[in-house]
């Protein structure tokens, strides 16, 4: 059994959030907390490559956040409808007839085995030692019961990566989902 993290999909499109003046920018991480009522539609610029338009693509503004088309949205809703996940509507400025969604995963779990993982640490603004990033992941066995999730680094939500299971990977492969790039981070 494996745990994978979703990584940048080389050779496919990247999506950039653009503001009302047409400038690309990073979106505030706070924009991706759980949104309860009528989320605003986000306008995106999508880079077109020779490989075409994938079903899943990397979102440039926030790591751990991906953009999906209606096919992937339907698959996730069919297989995982009860999990804490949101689809925030977005429009591609250069292909406005394509339905796209920012997939906002709100599933955070304390499944990282911190003592066994290799982590970079820093001293935070409060003068306390804190985990900055993870170089080698070791997961608790409960992680293998989850099909997709984000993790806590001690008390802090770590939204840098979205982790998925072999089951999630298999569903996407069986449905010929394009653009999904994964890196295996842990196996048992």
Image (cartoon, rainbow, N blue to C red):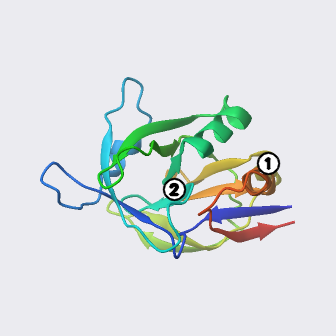
Figure check: 171 above or below 73: below
Residue 160 circle label: none
Measured as percent of width and height from the top left, residue 1 is found at 86, 61
Q: In the figure, is residue 152 to the left or right of 20?
A: right
> SS at mark 1?
helix
Q: How far apart are marks 2 and 1 (CA)?
A: 18 Å
Q: In the figure, is residue 104 to the left or right of 92?
A: right
Q: Quadrant of the C terminus?
A: bottom right
> SS at mark 2?
strand
- According to the picture, the residue beneath numbered tag 2 turns out to be 158
Measured as percent of width and height from the top left, residue 110 is found at 65, 48
Residue 142 circle label: 1
Give the residue at x 70% y 33%. Answer: 78
Give the residue at x 42% y 63%. Answer: 128
Residue 180 falls in image quadrant: bottom right
Residue 176 falls in image quadrant: bottom right
Measured as percent of width and height from the top left, residue 96 is found at 34, 46
Residue extending farthest to the top is 37
């Amino acid at each position: 059994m494996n745990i994978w993290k979703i990584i940048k999909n080389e050779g496919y499109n990247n999506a950039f959030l653009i503001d009302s003046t047409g400038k690309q920018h990073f979106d505030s991480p706070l924009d991706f907390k759980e949104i309860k009522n009528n989320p605003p539609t986000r306008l995106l610029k999508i880079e077109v490559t020779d490989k075409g338009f994938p079903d899943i693509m990397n979102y440039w503004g926030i790591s751990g956040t991906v953009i999906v088309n209606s096919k992937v949205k339907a698959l996730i809703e069919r297989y995982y409808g009860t999990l804490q996940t949101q689809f925030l509507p977005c429009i591609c400025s250069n292909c406005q007839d394509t339905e796209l969604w920012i997939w906002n995963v709100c599933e955070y779990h304390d499944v990282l085995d911190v003592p066994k993982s290799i982590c970079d640490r820093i001293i935070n603004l409060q003068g306390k030692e804190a985990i900055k990033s993870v170089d080698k992941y070791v997961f608790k066995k409960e992680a293998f019961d989850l099909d997709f999730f984000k993790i806590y680094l001690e008390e802090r939500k770590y939204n840098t990566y979205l982790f998925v299971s072999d089951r999630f990977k298999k569903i996407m492969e069986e449905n010929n989902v394009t653009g999904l790039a994964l890196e295996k981070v842990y196996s048992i």
